[in-house]
Image (cartoon, helix red, strand yellow):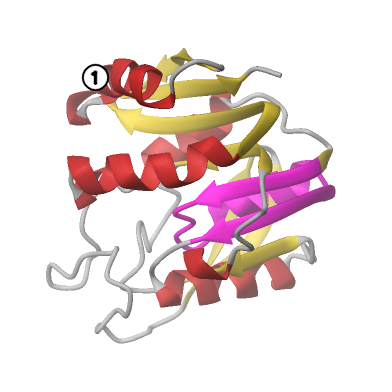
Amino acid sequence: MGKSNTGGEQYFASTPQSADIRRERKVTLRGYEATVQTSNGVFSGNRVDLGTSVLLRHAPMPPQRGTGLDLGCGWGPIALALGFESPELDVWAVDINERAVELTGENAKANGLNHVHAVSPDAVPADLTFDVIWSNPPIRIGKEALHNLLMAWLPRLNNDGAAYLVVQKNLGSDSLIPWLTQALGDGYTVSKYASSKGYRVIEVLRQA
């Protein structure tokens, strides 16, 4: 993950300063065709990011019901994929970037996915827990901030819940697995689920 194409502006700024120039894209998400709007100042504003593509290619079928989370949604490809595959899954898409939240909400609505809720992180009910989490996490916010982010959300997995995180090998995917194992502690298993195109998909399972 990197900077947006807006003169070095970070995609994880809460309020992007770049012009909000919308572009329409046709994308395929796990076999589902969607027409979406992207813009400047959000992660991978011109396309489906390679890491996101790896996650969508390899993550197993999400549960048909329950609650799902897209952590760091950008313009929404992961949330939309969850929404398409599981029409009865209550999908929450969160991002600190206000423009990303707006785009994800509009893209979900435009594609008839009314069960996708795009919100800022503090708008998620504090007692809400999740059956599945998919994420292309913002590695470049720094190790400490990333660790804090993951430990704020992964413990909200329900029993028998599963999270799938895609991380570049050269940005620390292999070191993240033992760190998560130690940080989450008993009741969780963390392992490499898939590897492709310089990325790893990490699986986090919470035991019943």
Nearer to the camera, 32 or 69 = 69
* Residue 207 x, y percent position in the rendering: 65, 17
* Residue 191 x, y percent position in the rendering: 45, 13
- Left or right: 138 in relation to 127: left
* Residue 25 x, y percent position in the rendering: 53, 64
Q: What range of the chain is rendered magenta?
A: 66-94
Residue found 56% across the figure and 17% down from its top: 187
Total numbered badges shown on the rendered structure: 1
Q: Residues within 10 Å of mark 1 (few under 14, many from 20)?
A: few
Q: What's the residue type where badge 1 is placed?
A: Ser
Is 155 situated above or below 169?
A: below
* Residue 77 x, y percent position in the rendering: 55, 52
Residue found 72% across the figure and 33% down from its top: 62
Residue found 71% across the figure and 19% down from its top: 208
Is residue 68 covered in magenta? yes
The reply to whether residue 22 is in sight is yes
The reply to whether residue 1 is in sight is no
